[in-house]
Amino acid sequence: MTTANEVGDLARDKAVTVAVAESLTAGNVAAALGAAPDSAEWFRGGIVAYSTEVKHQLLDVPDIPVVSEAAAIAMATSVRAMMGADVAVAVTGVGGPGPQDGEPAGSVWFAVATADGARGVYRRFDGGPARVVDRSVRHALELLLDAVHSAA
């Protein structure tokens, strides 16, 4: 069973809804969740905000570097409210090959937002852009699974 399916099974069992805000992963987290069985019951949707301007305008990211904990938290908090979800995850980072916002390639900030607040998580993944994206998608899904598991 895939992690997205596990998220779906648990979300359905606990009546928890899920949303995502993605930059680096370009909609791949949402695609994985949408492909899970019965996703219409628990997946509220997502925002792919690849450009800096979209993050600022649509997801209320303040005028700060978008590859940062504060940006990830703003993205998760905003998409959770926008979608009316119980739990949201956000991903923003540097796929490479070069740096962005002073962060080296492979630097990724995640955030999870719930009714109890939001928290950021930093990871650095080795490899080229495709590998960084793949590992980021997997980690975002693992964070969602933990958040749904902890949700009331």
Image: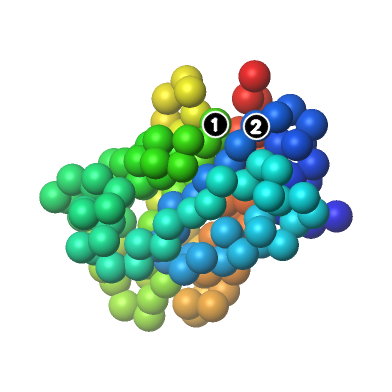
Colour mode of the rendering: rainbow
Give whichever of 102, 147 is nearer the camera: 147
Q: Earlier in the sequence, mark 2 or mark 1?
A: 2
Could you tell me residue 73's position as x and y percent?
Answer: 36, 40
* Along the line of sight, the residue nearer the viewer: 132 or 7: 7
Q: Is residue 112 left or right of residue 63?
A: right
Check the image and name the residue furthest to the front: 40
Residue at position x 35%, y 67% in the image:
50
Instruction: Please tell me whether residue 149 is drawn above or below residue 134 in the rendered image.
Output: above
Q: Are marks 2 and 1 in contact (CB under 8 Å)?
A: yes
Image check: 28 left or right of 118?
A: right
In x, y percent, where is residue 96?
Answer: 38, 76
The residue wearing badge 2 is: 16
Q: Residue 17's spot in the image, x, y percent?
A: 61, 37
Which residue is identified by label 1? 86
Which quadrant holds the C terminus? top right
Of all residues, the one furthest to the right in this rendering is 1
Q: Label 1: few (<14), some or many (≥20) within 10 Å?
A: many
Dot 2: few (<14), some (14–19), or many (≥20) neighbours within 10 Å? Answer: many
Residue at x-position 75% and y-position 36%:
12
CA separation, marks 2 and 1? 6 Å
Q: Position of residue 15 (x, y in %)?
A: 70, 29
Image quarter (top left, top right, bottom left or bottom right) of the N terminus: bottom right
Give residue 126's mark.
none
Of residues 47 and 100, the one drawn nearer to the viewer in this rendering: 47
Secondary-structure class at tag 1: loop
Question: Type of residue at label 2?
Answer: Val
Amino acid type, mark 1: Asp
Q: What residue is rendered at 68% in x and 50% in y?
A: 40
Q: Nearer the viewer, residue 46 or 41?
A: 41
Tell me which residue sits at (72%, 62%) in the image.
Answer: 35
> Would residue 88 be visible to someone looking at this image?
yes
